[in-house]
């Protein structure tokens, strides 16, 4: 893949709840503060109708850049499964047996992002792959979710298939109200250096995004049940001052502004790639 792929998909991930786990295991299910690669790749695989045992090597070649429109707030759910059922109907263990009496209730603590909204750019030099993913997001084989099955999106996910996706990632309306004390830096997360973002205005106390800020273990190797595998990848973060950021608010105000932008800037490019 080239450093600045010329084509890509623009996605909108928003809903009452989202959950993007990175360390989820057993009784504790966390969420990252942004969509993970494993979550987005899994969503694409579901849209394409791939079984969990199917390879996803091609999907992991997609590069992902996330814009945080609204960070949301982390909420926790005290979650129980299997309580109050007869011994022969309790939750089945990994060896195929039923849980013992008095241990039939599974208790877990699950985290979610409430009222968060993200805009994503998925970029690649593989036009056939982008076409397939765009078609899958328009008409998915299986339902699409924001990290977990309990987190459906509030509307269509695909905004368009466009030239110069990073340009549009900067220009697309923000699903947020303009802060009272003026525009604030907008956070971007990526799996590649973010110096390629088409802007030169940065928060003074932030790096330029060309150096990774750590690692996150969300690169999927296999979604096979009971044998899921993930590997770490570098995480890049950049906080960008956008003086003319198009804050579009919430609800119908935002949707009308988004519709206008899509109709003016994305519709022609999207139709040409179908």
Image (cartoon, grey):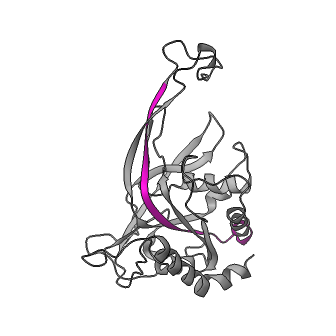
Comparing 2 with 165, the one in front is 165
**61 left or right of 120 in image:** right
Q: Quadrant of residue 116?
A: bottom left
Q: Where residue 6 appears, x then y in whole percent? A: 61, 79
* In the displayed structure image, the side of residue 50 where residue 217 appears, left or right: left
Question: Residue 222, position in %: x, y?
Answer: 64, 44
Q: Which residues are magenta?
A: 106-130
Estimate the x, y position of residue 262 in percent, counting from the top left. 59, 81
Q: Residue at x 48, y 81 (%)?
A: 171
Give above or below for 118 relative to 265. above
At a point 68% along the width and 79% down the height, the residue shown is 270
The residue shown at (61%, 63%) is 62
Q: Is residue 32 visible?
A: no
Q: Position of residue 237 (x, y in %)?
A: 39, 64
The reply to whether residue 183 is visible in this rendering is yes
Residue drawn at (48%, 14%), measured in percent from left and top?
Answer: 102
């Amino acid at each position: 893949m080239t450093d600045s792929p010329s084509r890509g998909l623009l996605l909108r991930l928003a809903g009452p709840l989202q959950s993007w786990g990175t360390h989820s295991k057993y009784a504790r299910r966390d969420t990252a503060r942004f969509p993970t690669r494993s979550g987005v790749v899994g969503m694409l695989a579901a849209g394409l109708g791939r079984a969990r045992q199917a390879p996803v090597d091609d999907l992991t070649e997609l590069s992902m850049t996330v814009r945080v429109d609204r960070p949301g707030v982390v909420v926790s759910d005290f979650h129980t499964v299997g309580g109050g059922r007869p011994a022969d109907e309790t939750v089945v263990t990994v060896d195929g047996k039923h849980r013992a009496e008095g241990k039939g209730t599974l208790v877990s603590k699950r985290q979610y992002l409430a009222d968060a909204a993200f805009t994503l750019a998925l970029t690649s030099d593989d036009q056939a792959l982008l076409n397939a993913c765009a078609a899958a997001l328009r008409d998915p084989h299986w339902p699409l979710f924001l990290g977990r099955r309990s987190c459906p999106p509030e509307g269509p996910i695909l905004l368009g298939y466009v030239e110069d996706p990073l340009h549009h990632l900067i220009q697309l309306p923000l699903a947020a109200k303009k802060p009272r004390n003026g525009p604030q830096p907008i956070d971007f997360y990526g799996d590649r250096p973010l110096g390629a973002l088409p802007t030169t205005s940065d928060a003074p106390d932030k790096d330029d995004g060309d150096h990774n800020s750590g690692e996150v273990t969300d690169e999927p190797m296999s979604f096979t049940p009971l044998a899921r595998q993930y590997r770490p990848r570098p995480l890049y973060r950049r906080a960008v001052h956008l003086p003319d950021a198009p804050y579009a608010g919430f609800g119908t105000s935002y949707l009308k502004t988004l519709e206008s932008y899509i109709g003016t800037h994305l519709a022609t490019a999207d139709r040409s790639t179908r």
